[in-house]
Image (cartoon, rainbow, N blue to C red):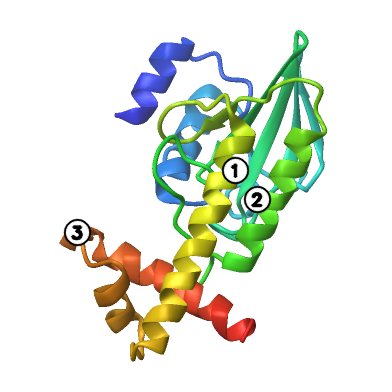
Amino acid sequence: MHEERIMSQTLGRISSILLTHRHDDHSACAAVLAARSHAPVFAMDPKFASDSKRILHDQQELKFDELGLRVIATPGHTSDSVMFMATGDDELALFTGDTILGEGSSIITFPDGDVGAYLRSLDTIESIVRAQSKQVPLLPGHGNAHDDSLLLITKYRAHRLERLAEIRMAIAQGATDAESIVDMVYQSVNAALRPAALMATEAQLAYLNEHA
């Protein structure tokens, strides 16, 4: 099991557990790991935090020995999504959770996720990266790390805006709901991924309705 591999890799020496967001593939074994390692769980969502002192807040500074972490609220993928800017030994890195992935694009989960919040979060990330005097690697929750962070952020924003434009065009061509939009915009999507495409489309429709 996943927690067994983590315990093996860390030899059980876990001082704290930090969640980037509530989705099961990131949070499901947190409580088990906490019980086995006696480590507290830090999370934006109070449901997952060990106690009130471990509820994360935007711009909060955390310190673990020589490692410093700054909490950056990045809602969009989910309402409780956060990133962690890590500093130590003159190095920087940004743990991005599912806001920016190792490959592909992040899904905006509806109704918890929000396209407008996601676009603003990309702006926040870009501003933070540009403010640094050195390159900031992006370390996603899935997939490979990225060194060219500004280029990737630009690609993520362009993809989201392009998808919104495609949905506007589908509506102009007669699509009336998420199902018909998916039929037009996501024509090559695998059947197994159709529910995710529908969820993303609902989130984008909500954004377009708000900005009509």
Tell me the tag on residue 122. 2
Using the image, determine if residue 72 lies above or below residue 102. Answer: below
Quadrant housing residue 211:
bottom right
Tell me the tag on residue 39. none
Using the image, determine if residue 115 lies above or below residue 70. Answer: below
Q: Quadrant of the C terminus?
A: bottom right
Residue contact between numbered discs 2 and 1, judged by CB atoms under 8 Å:
yes
Q: What amino acid does circle 1 point to?
A: Ile
Earlier-in-chain disc, 3 versus 1: 1
**Disc 3 on helix, strand or loop?**
helix
Q: Which residue is mark 3?
A: 192
Residue appearing at x 53%, y 79% in the figure: 206
- Decide if residue 54 is in sight here: no
Local packing at callout 3 (Cα closer than 10 Å; few below 14, some 14-19, many 20+) is few
- Decide if residue 13 is in sight here: yes
Front one among 189 and 199: 189
Residue appearing at x 48%, y 55% in the figure: 159
Using the image, determine if residue 124 lies above or below residue 160. Answer: above
Real-space Cα distance between discs 2 and 1? 7 Å
Q: Quadrant of the N terminus?
A: top left
Front one among 133 and 110: 133
